[in-house]
Amino acid sequence: MKYKYWSWENYFTKKDIKNINNFIDNNFNCYEDPIYIATDKTNKNKKNVLVKCISYNKIKKYLKNLLETCLYVNKKNFGYDLFNSLENGYCNLNIYSADKLQSYDWHIDAVPHPYEDIKFTILINLSMNPYEGGKFKIFDQYEKDVNELDKPGNVIMFKSYLNHKVTPIIKGERRTLAIFLNGPNFK
């Protein structure tokens, strides 16, 4: 079966990872608004993770080449209509800690906006130290471990409407930066 994601190994170096983390930790705009946290049918949060939000404008110097690559992949393989700019968008640094067995249950990435959809999610493993647990999984007819995201510096890009989750972190700290590519509603 062909899965609906792309991956890049060692896209970011250890030095890049340290610089990006330091920049976000010192310049993030806010913590994630609870309105954007996925919930189940009983309104229980599916996510118990610390999320630092940073505007794309602040961090674009670190992400510009990656985003150009992702836009090229879309153009050559998917042809989704995407907004031309991320200038007003945000990126989310998800920090999973073993102290609280943090995880993110099955969900899709979506926005509460009537005229747009998230088309792709890009995840960068920005972990600074080894960790255990925190496996990223996608469900597309059956559950699949996405091992390509296990290593710091690796990147994946997937269709945001695919169910995905992160298993509980059991040792250390897992950090991933989420970038969302939005466009007009799917038709």
Image (cartoon, rainbow, N blue to C red):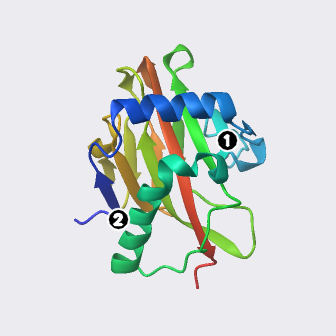
Q: Which residue is mark 2?
A: 4
Q: Is residue 104 visible?
A: yes
Q: Position of 185 compared to 29: left or right? A: left
Q: Position of 72 compared to 26: left or right? A: left
Depth check, mark 1 against mark 2: the one in front is: 1
Q: Earlier in the sequence, mark 1 or mark 2?
A: 2
Q: Identify which amino acid the numbered label 2 is placed on.
A: Lys
Q: Position of residue 68 (x, y in %)?
A: 43, 65
Q: Secondary structure at mark 1?
A: strand
Q: Position of residue 162 (x, y in %)?
A: 46, 61
| Residue 31: quarter of image | top right
| Residue 29: quarter of image | top right
Q: Position of residue 27 (x, y in %)?
A: 68, 34
Image quadrant in which the N terminus is located: bottom left
Q: 161 or 127: nearer the eye?
A: 127
Q: Which residue is mark 1?
A: 53
**Residue at horizontal 54%, vertical 53%?**
179
Q: CA distance from mark 1 to mark 2?
A: 26 Å
| Residue 7: quarter of image | bottom left
Q: Please determine whether, in this image, residue 156 is positioned above or below residue 140.
A: above
**Residue at horizontal 71%, vertical 60%?**
88
Q: Position of residue 186 (x, y in %)?
A: 58, 79
Q: 41 or 113: nearer the eye?
A: 113
Residue 114 is marked as none
Q: 171 or 141: nearer the eye?
A: 171
Q: Residues within 10 Å of mark 1 (few under 14, many from 20)?
A: many
Q: Is residue 38 visible?
A: no
Which residue occupies the extreme left position in the image? 1
Q: Identify which amino acid the numbered label 1 is placed on.
A: Cys
Image quadrant in which the C terminus is located: bottom right
Q: Please determine whether, in this image, residue 86 is positioned above or below residue 147.
A: below
Labels 1 & 2 near each other (Cβ < 8 A)? no
